[in-house]
Amino acid sequence: MTDGYVPIYRRRREGLTDYGARKKAVTSRHTLLAVRITDKNVTSQFLLPKEGGDEVLSSSHSRQLLKLGWKGSLKSTPACYLLGLYSGKRALEKGVKAAVLYNGVEPFVRGSRVAAFVKGVVDAGVSVPVGEEALPSQERVSGKPIADYASKLASEDKDLYSKAFSTLTKRGFKPEEYPLNFEATRSAIMGSGKK
């Protein structure tokens, strides 16, 4: 037996779990909001932490936005906001009124897609402790910068435009229409419009 050797859990070595933060989350007894962004999609869960395992109160996936009329990227800033809005509404229906963002080992970055998701959850009516300065602007979450960039590329460099937005244009969506599609999908989520 070697003196002074302390084994480090594999998930900690690999940077997958911060056990200190996890312990605080489990003992806090708050509902947690977990958001994960992958190469293609965004998923979220409202969790009630328990010692035997977390209880999922509500979950959402960005593919659900397609049923509501969303045509843009499923991992963009506007998609994250819309999924946050949708997730917040579903969580309210399940009785969740407040939650704390639990990002695991991922840092929370001001103005990021996770921040856009949190803005959507807050706009839906779920209380999440976050400073207003950390959230992206309404113009950014509506997709206006993407639409402006797409318009500029369409007039200046057609080849770069077709490369940058090939996935969207193959589906028949013009990225210049992000703000219009954003508003239509937002209305569908809020219940004032249909697909």
Image: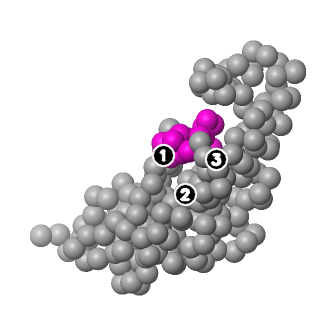
Q: Is residue 99 left or right of residue 166?
A: left
In-image side of 141 versus 125 (left or right): right
Report the Cα–Cα distance between label 1 and label 2: 9 Å
Mark closer to the chain start, 1 or 2 = 1
Q: Earlier in the sequence, mark 1 or mark 3?
A: 1
- Which quadrant: the N terminus? bottom left
Residue to which mark 3 is pinned = 185
Give the residue type at disc 3.
Thr
Q: Residue at horizontal 43%, vertical 67%?
A: 46
The image's colouring method is one colour
* Secondary structure under the numbered disc 3 in the rendered image: helix
- Crowding at dot 1, Cα within 10 Å, few <14 / some 14-19 / many 20+, comes out as few
Q: Which mark is residue 64?
A: 1
Residue at far top of view: 159
- Residue 85: image quadrant is bottom right
Residue in view at x 60 percent, y 57 percent:
191
Q: Position of residue 71 (x, y in %)?
A: 61, 35
The residue identified by callout 2 is 86
- Magenta-tinted stretch: 62-77
Q: CA distance from mark 3 to mark 2?
A: 10 Å
